[in-house]
Image (tube, rainbow, N blue to C red):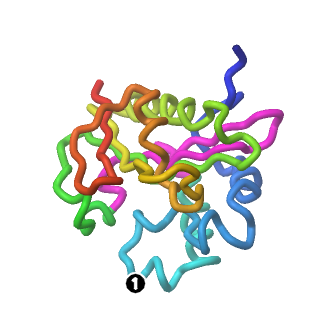
Amino acid sequence: MTDPAGDIRPVTPGDWPAFEALMGPKRGGSGGCWCMLWRLDRKTFDAGKGEANRDAIRALFAHDPAPGLIAYADDKAVGWVSVAPRPDFPYLARSRLFRGGDAPGLWSVSCLTVAREHRRKGVSVALLNAAADHARAHGAAAVEGYPVAPDRPNYPPVYSWTGLESAFRKAGFEEVARPSPTRPVMRRTF
């Protein structure tokens, strides 16, 4: 079977146009977030919705390690996963659900986006596997995510921007905590 995500690689500045097209130049993923919600304090994030958040994530594309990976199919971006050392996401330290997991070498997946026409084809699982490989290659001892465990069928994709529990399980992540009925903490240890 052909890989449903095609080519998955860490982002570089050259990937910006494809990433911007995937996120939507006007909406930036979700309401101007540009995948910066977990990377900024709340005041800075809210003030930066739109252009400032877009500029902030774009600047991160030049960092090593990359702030995430992008999936291409037929030279078009079809998916994105944000993955970095947990301290890069100060939101987690503030979160009532996810604070307290600051083990050395722990990386986190904060965002998982797949283009509508590529959903339900295994792209999320491929991105999660690639994110785990990326984290491990940069010295991570484990990587965890905070997906949604939908409590009803046909859960709206707009509310599952952290990924779905089922995709994490298929990618070899195991549940290590469940701070709420619909929000497990899933971890893959190396």
Is 157 or 33 nearer to us in this picture? 157
Can you say whether 39 is above or below 3 in the image? below
Can you say whether 57 is above or below 68 in the image? below
Residue receiving disc 1 = 43
Q: Residues within 10 Å of mark 1 (few under 14, many from 20)?
A: few
The residue lying at 52 percent from left, 61 percent from top is 159
The residue lying at 36 percent from left, 75 percent from top is 41
Can you say whether 28 is above or below 187 in the image? below
Q: Is residue 4 left or right of residue 87?
A: right
Q: Is residue 188 left or right of residue 84?
A: left
Number of labelled discs?
1
Magenta residues span 62-89
Q: Considering the numbered disc 1 on the image, is that residue within a helix, a strand or a loop?
A: helix
The quarter of the picture where residue 43 lies is bottom left
Find the residue positioned furthest to the top: 1
Q: Does the magenta run of residues contain 182?
A: no
Query: Which of the image's four quarters has the C terminus?
Result: top left
Q: Does the magenta run of residues contain 82?
A: yes
| Residue type, mark 1 in image | Lys
Q: Position of residue 73 (x, y in %)?
A: 77, 34
Q: Position of residue 132 (x, y in %)?
A: 42, 32
Q: Position of residue 68 (x, y in %)?
A: 52, 46
The residue lying at 22 percent from left, 39 percent from top is 176
Q: Position of residue 97 (x, y in %)?
A: 25, 61
Find the residue positioned furthest to the front: 152
Query: Which of the image's four quarters has the N terminus?
Result: top right
The residue lying at 59 percent from left, 50 percent from top is 113
